[in-house]
Image (spheres, grey):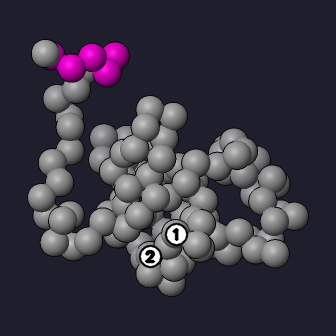
Amino acid sequence: MKVNVIFAKHQDSEKFYLFEIDPRQINPSYLNLGDTLFVDTCKGMAVATAATNVISIYETDLENFCKMCGATLPLKKCIEKVSREFSAHIQYSSFIPENDVLPY
């Protein structure tokens, strides 16, 4: 069985992150390089940009693939592709301090 994954990066980071795509939630053929995505992170839902097209990997190869690219299992999920119309309205929160404390 194959697992669908995608590399994505957050606006204020140069690092690429690997996310799993659940085909029951998102049709993998619907995602493309450059798409704006909602992704699950250890800090909650975030916005990221797809850095690759979808990559299909055999489940048996996933652990080694993750080791090669520095990802840890279990992978966080790609939640949804952001529509082009909605994407134009997203404002990235670059004003949030590094300790994630809002100013109010």
User: Who is closer to the viewer here, 73 or 22?
Assistant: 22
Q: Position of residue 14 (x, y in %)?
A: 40, 44
Question: In this rendering, is residue 103 above or below 42?
Answer: above
- Residue type for callout 1: Gln
Residue 71 appears left or right of 65: left
Residue shown at 13%/15% (left/top)?
104
Q: Amino acid at mark 2?
A: Leu
Question: Can you see residue 50?
Answer: yes
- Residue 44, magenta (yes or no): no
Distance between the alpha carbons at the discs numbered 2 and 1: 12 Å
Is residue 54 in view? no
Across and down, in percent, residue 18 comes to: 57, 54
Q: Residue at point 17% right, 54% down?
A: 90
Q: Is residue 30 above or below residue 65?
A: below
Circle 2 — which element? Answer: loop
Q: What secondary structure characterizes most of the magenta part?
A: loop
The residue indicated by pointer 1 is 25
Identified at 31% across, 21% down, the residue is 100
Q: Position of residue 102 (x, y in %)?
A: 21, 20
Which residue is labeled 2 in the image? 31
Q: Is residue 30 left or right of residue 93?
A: right
